[in-house]
Amino acid sequence: DGGITQSPKYLFRKEGQNVTLSCEQNLNHDAMYWYRQDPGQGLRLIYYSQIVNDFQKGDIAEGYSVSREKKESFPLTVTSAQKNPTAFYLCASSIFRQPQDTQYFGPGTRLTVL
Amino acid sequence: AQKVTQAQTEISVVEKEDVTLDCVYETRDTTYYLFWYKQPPSGELVFLIRRNSFDEQNEISGRYSWNFQKSTSSFNFTITASQVVDSAVYFCALSEAYSGGSNYKLTFGKGTLLTVNP
């Protein structure tokens, strides 16, 4: 089955630690995205990638980093510079990065800073 | 700047009632796309529908229907004969074309929490 997988489902981090969230897709999509969701809020874009070896900052990129070495994979690192990292993180992909292209989402990773 | 407003933060209904979720958007572009997603308690966003700005036909899919009205900048979502499994957060989203090519943005509303009670 084609889809998007994210791991882990739950992640706990101590303050000062970097953590990496995994996102893999087998939909053969060019574009991939990372969003952050806080309680009662819509989704906010952290980073996106149109193609392998390319990525761009979204609205709230500070304290996060990404890489896109393979078409299928778009990992997100939450660094210690991120002041308030506790949130639900969603990865998405679309066939291309065009306004009409539907974004499909993974199951999410819930990050808690202890 | 584009904006999506879902004024209903929470709605609670009894099973088999019909319910309408409101979505009002703002955009300066003439070409844009509207989406609805469902987020069940598991957390994953499930795509429901995409509508182009130049297609104002209403759409029905089983118990779901969507009413798109450009005159009022609204794209409302109705669930007929609601069921407990419809309980979820529903998001409306807007993306604009011709706003910088690949620099377009998908803007989400804050969502409406629908609770369907048995």
Image (tube, helix red, strand yellow):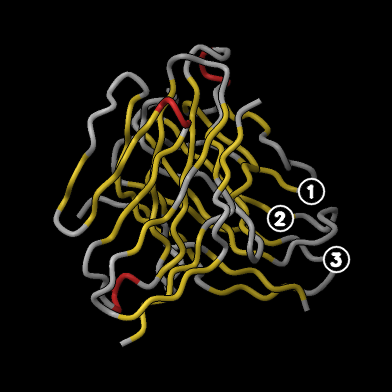
Sequence-earlier tag: 2 or 1: 1
Disc on res. A78:
2
Sequence-earlier tag: 3 or 1: 3
- The amino acid type, in three-letter code, at marker 1 is Gly
Residue contact at pointers 3 and 1, CB within 8 angstroms: no
User: What is the distance, in whole Å, between disc 3 and disc 1 at their CAs?
Assistant: 12 Å
Q: Secondary structure at mark 2?
A: strand
Q: Quadrant of the C terminus of chain B?
A: bottom left
Q: Residue A30, how many percent across, how many down?
A: 39, 30
Residue contact at pointers 2 and 1, CB within 8 angstroms: yes
Sequence-earlier tag: 3 or 2: 3
Q: Residue B24, how many percent across, how many down?
A: 51, 40
Disc on res. A63:
1
Tell which of A54 and B90 is nearer to you. B90
User: What is the distance, in whole Å, between disc 2 and disc 1 at their CAs?
Assistant: 6 Å
Chain letter of the residue carrying label 2: A
Q: Residue B93, how many percent across, how many down?
A: 48, 41
Q: Residue A82, how many percent across, how many down?
A: 81, 55
